[in-house]
Image: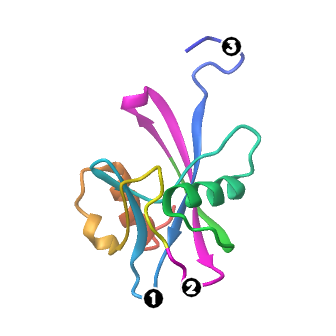
């Protein structure tokens, strides 16, 4: 990394969503082999909730309004990108609870899954599904 005013202090910041259905299942997306919470990177100058709405549409084709609450943050190293990541995790309540979703251009699959399905996963992203899907916030 180029040394500057803030050496080694840069993170890729993302907004992620926890959307639960009436059965306590959480909406998840699969990119490759891992499942994750839907959402993604916040573009420069973009508001986190604007980014989350955009990313939800790109990944799940959900284009609805929602109420949100910031429920946690996670900071971690992404080896494949040799970079730090910071996730802002929001619990969303959809204005229309009967929304329709399907895989968008950025993911392979979208599904509601039980958080317990990921309790013993080796994947950090799947551990976040377990933690936040059950409401274990930091």
Q: Is residue 30 left or right of residue 11?
A: left
Front-most of 74 and 34? 34
Local crowd size for mark 3, using a 10 Å CA cut-off: few (<14), some (14–19), many (≥20): few
Q: Are marks 1 and 2 in contact (CB under 8 Å)?
A: yes
The range drawn in magenta is 75-100
Calculate the distance from the C-alpha at mark 1 to the C-alpha at mark 3.
49 Å
Identify the residue under disc 2.
Answer: 97
Image point 57% across, 68% down: which residue?
62
Residue 105 location, x and y as percent? 47, 51
Magenta-span inclusion, residue 95? yes
Query: What main secondary structure does the magenta stretch of the protein show?
Result: strand
Local crowd size for mark 2, using a 10 Å CA cut-off: few (<14), some (14–19), many (≥20): few
Sequence order check, earlier mark of 1 and 2? 1
Q: Is residue 125 above or below residue 17?
A: above
In the picture, the disc for residue 57 is: none
Number of numbered discs: 3
Calculate the distance from the C-alpha at mark 3 to the C-alpha at mark 2.
47 Å
Mark in the foreground, 1 or 2:
2
Q: Is residue 74 left or right of residue 54?
A: left
Sequence order check, earlier mark of 1 and 3? 3
Calculate the distance from the C-alpha at mark 1 to the C-alpha at mark 2.
9 Å
Can you name the residue that lies furthest to the bottom here?
22
Identify the image quadrant of residue 5: top right
Image point 64% across, 55% down: which residue?
54
Mark in the foreground, 1 or 3:
1
Q: Is residue 40 left or right of residue 123?
A: right
Identify the residue under disc 1.
Answer: 22
In the picture, the disc for residue 4 is: 3
């Amino acid at each position: 990394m180029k040394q500057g005013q803030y050496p080694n202090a840069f993170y890729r910041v993302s907004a992620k969503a926890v959307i639960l259905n009436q059965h306590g299942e959480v909406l998840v997306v699969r990119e490759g082999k891992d499942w994750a919470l839907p959402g993604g990177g916040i573009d420069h100058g973009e508001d986190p909730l604007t980014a989350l709405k955009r990313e939800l549409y790109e990944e799940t084709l959900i284009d609805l309004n929602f109420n949100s609450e910031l429920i946690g943050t996670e900071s971690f190293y992404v080896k494949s990108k040799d970079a730090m990541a910071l996730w802002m995790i929001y619990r969303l309540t959809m204005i229309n609870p009967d929304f329709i979703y399907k895989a968008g251009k950025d993911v392979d699959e979208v599904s509601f899954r039980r958080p317990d399905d990921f309790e013993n996963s080796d994947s950090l992203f799947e551990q976040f599904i377990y933690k936040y899907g059950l409401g274990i916030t930091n």
